[in-house]
Image (cartoon, rainbow, N blue to C red):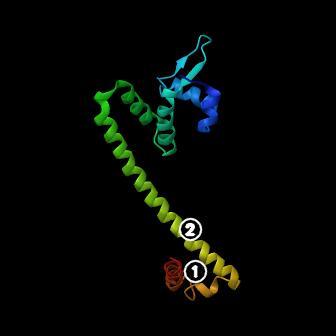
């Protein structure tokens, strides 16, 4: 079976060697073996765990929760229901975060469009309700119609 050094794993998963050492010391990598010199040695079997850890970490799941999940993995089949529930719960949370991010992205795109139009006009005054600093709602409707027409 092929083995990988900690630096190879760090490069593969775009993390630093100290980060991997921290993960190991924090109990996230209980599957990692050490060679005769005491260096961490990763195997092909470890790559699946590392892929899961990387995905969960990039999904903003706290390390303490990832550690619990990995502990369940190490325990074997008796924790399959817990692992399934964990993934289902994380999927729901991630979908909720994605929905919020998509709403924020939509708003930022609207504001970008607005500022582009204001820059082209050389002023915001043409877009505001007279006597206020409030953007007239008709401009948002114009933007939304342009977006629908572009689809």
Q: Is residue 58 above or below residue 102?
A: above
Residue at 58% of width from left, 20% of height from top?
A: 40
Q: From the viewer's perspective, is residue 90 above or below residue 41?
A: below
Q: CA distance from mark 2 to mark 1?
A: 18 Å
Query: Residue 90: x percent and y percent?
Result: 39, 45
**Residue at 51% over, 31% down:** 47
Residue highlighted by disc 1:
133
Q: Nearer the viewer, residue 65 or 55?
A: 55
> Left of 39 or right of it: where is 100?
left
What is the number of the mark on residue 96? Answer: none
Residues packed near mark 2 inside 10 Å, few (<14), some (14 to 19) or many (20 plus): few
Mark nearer the viewer, 2 or 1: 2
- Which secondary structure lies at badge 2? helix
Contact (Cβ within 8 Å) of mark 2 with mark 1: no
Q: In the image, is 113 to the left or to the right of 26?
A: right
Q: Nearer the viewer, residue 132 or 142?
A: 142
Q: Is residue 84 left or right of residue 149?
A: left
User: Can you name the residue that lies furthest to the front here?
Assistant: 1
Query: Tag 1, which secondary structure?
Result: loop
Could you tell me which residue is drawn at 39 percent across and 25 percent down?
A: 74
**First reached walking from the N terminus: tag 2 or tag 1:** 2
- Mark 2 = which residue? 108
Crowd band around label 1 with a 10 angstrom C-alpha radius: few (<14), some (14–19), many (20+)? few
Residue 111 place in picture, x, y as percent = 58, 73
Of all residues shown, which one is farthest toward the top?
36
How far across and down, in percent of the image, does residue 149 sit?
51, 81
Location of residue 122 in the rendering, given as x and y in whole percent from the top left corner: 71, 83
- Residues 70 and 129: in front is 70
């Amino acid at each position: 079976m092929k083995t990988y050094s900690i630096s190879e794993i760090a490069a593969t998963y775009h993390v630093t060697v100290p980060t991997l050492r921290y993960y190991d010391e924090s109990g996230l990598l209980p599957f990692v073996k050490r060679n005769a010199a005491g260096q961490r040695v990763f195997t092909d079997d470890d790559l699946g765990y590392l892929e899961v850890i990387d995905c969960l970490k990039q999904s903003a799941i706290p390390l303490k929760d990832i550690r619990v999940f990995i502990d369940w993995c190490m325990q074997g089949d008796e924790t399959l229901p817990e692992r399934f529930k964990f993934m289902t719960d994380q999927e729901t949370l991630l979908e909720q975060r994605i929905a919020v991010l998509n709403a924020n992205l939509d708003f930022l795109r609207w504001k970008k469009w607005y500022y582009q139009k204001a820059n082209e006009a050389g002023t915001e005054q043409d877009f505001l309700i007279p006597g206020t600093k409030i953007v007239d709602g008709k401009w948002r409707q114009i933007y939304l119609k342009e977006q629908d027409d572009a689809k």
